[in-house]
Image: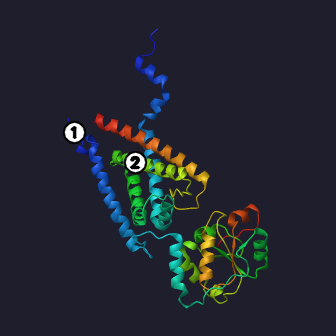
Amino acid sequence: MKRSPFWKRHPANDLVFLIACCGAALLVGLALNALRDPALPLVYQGKSERLEESVRRLASHTPPSRIPVLGDEIDLQTFRRFVEDGKGLVLDARPEMIHCLGHVPGARSLARDDFEKSYARLGKKLSNDKDQPLAVYCSDISCEDSRLVQAALVKLGYTQVAVFAGGWAAWTRARLPEEICP
Amino acid sequence: MGGLDPGEASRGDLPVKGFLDHKGFELALRIVIGGLFVYSGGVKIMDPLSFADSIETFKLLPPHAINLLAMSLPPFELIMGLLLATGWRKRAAALAISVLAIVFAVALAQGMARGLKVDCGCFGGGAPSPGEIWFSLGRDLLLLATSAWLYLGICRESKAL
């Protein structure tokens, strides 16, 4: 009678195999990370630490921050007027992919998780006038991305940065117009 | 009055058992769970930073372990998903997935017990909400039950060989 392979008969060998798989997964993970730009550092940095690092790199030539005059936080009515007037810039702090699926009309993506690249993409539209009114929003009242981006912009010298705390959830709840990326 | 033979009678009494023991059912489960792990691993490989942020919300690991786990767990999930779906070393894969499901469930439960705003990170990162955490825990327990059932079935099958 033909005998089945050794590993089929001895469950304990599964553990040896799984330990080898763990090692292989670690090596694959490290190799993939080495190919990534930017690579993930070996020690975890929190969201705010990462953003601060980006701001430090960007802020090497910016003047010290001033106190915002637009107000620290705005409600839905004020934000709606701000969007409709079109006199300032609306910034979406959510990841760019989420922004593309639906955002406040006219809003530009300034993603917290990819701040440096988003900031560079916005270019002169943002950096030419550091006194222009800016309103930042993210998903909802519980998300912290808009606050983090507001703090980063203030550090970069922007004087009027307000947060619309209700975010995308409050905007869509009020059935206000939406826009998607082309 | 011939009647049914005892074997037929017992199969007739428990049609669900016959269905659960069916090879095709096991194969379908392996493909579904394996596919789920391949997808989950793939999504996290694409965005390890969001996954690291999700791990951090559990407040269980020190900073130097978070990124290592965020880099290595997704490939491990992907490998286990492939093994389970293809059937090569399926017993080991079912064991690994059961253990992972236990670890995920314990991590989620401790986060909820401590009142943390835990982000499951099961299929990439996202803003956590209490309803989603209950849903994640329920899904995880279902995964645990299914993978454990698969593992025990495969063990029985191996012994029979």
Residue at 48% across, 60% down? B55
Q: Residue B10 got which mark?
A: none
Q: Residues within 10 Å of mark 2 (few under 14, many from 20)?
A: some
Q: Residues within 10 Å of mark 1 (few under 14, many from 20)?
A: few
Near-viewer residue (B32 or A108): A108
Residue at 48% across, 45% down? B143
Real-space Cα separation, disc 2 to disc 1, in angstroms? 29 Å
Q: Residue A3 got which mark?
A: 1
- Give the percent coordinates (x, y) of residue B127: 59, 61
- Give the percent coordinates (x, y) of residue A174: 77, 63
Near-viewer residue (A57 or B142): A57
Q: How is the image coloured?
A: rainbow
Q: Residue furthest left?
A: A1
Q: Is residue A59 visible?
A: yes
Amino acid type of the residue that numbered disc 2 sits on in the rendered structure: Val
Question: The residue tagged with tag 2: helix, strand or loop?
Answer: helix
Q: Residue B99 got which mark?
A: 2
Q: Is residue B28 visible?
A: no
- Give the percent coordinates (x, y) of residue B84: 39, 49
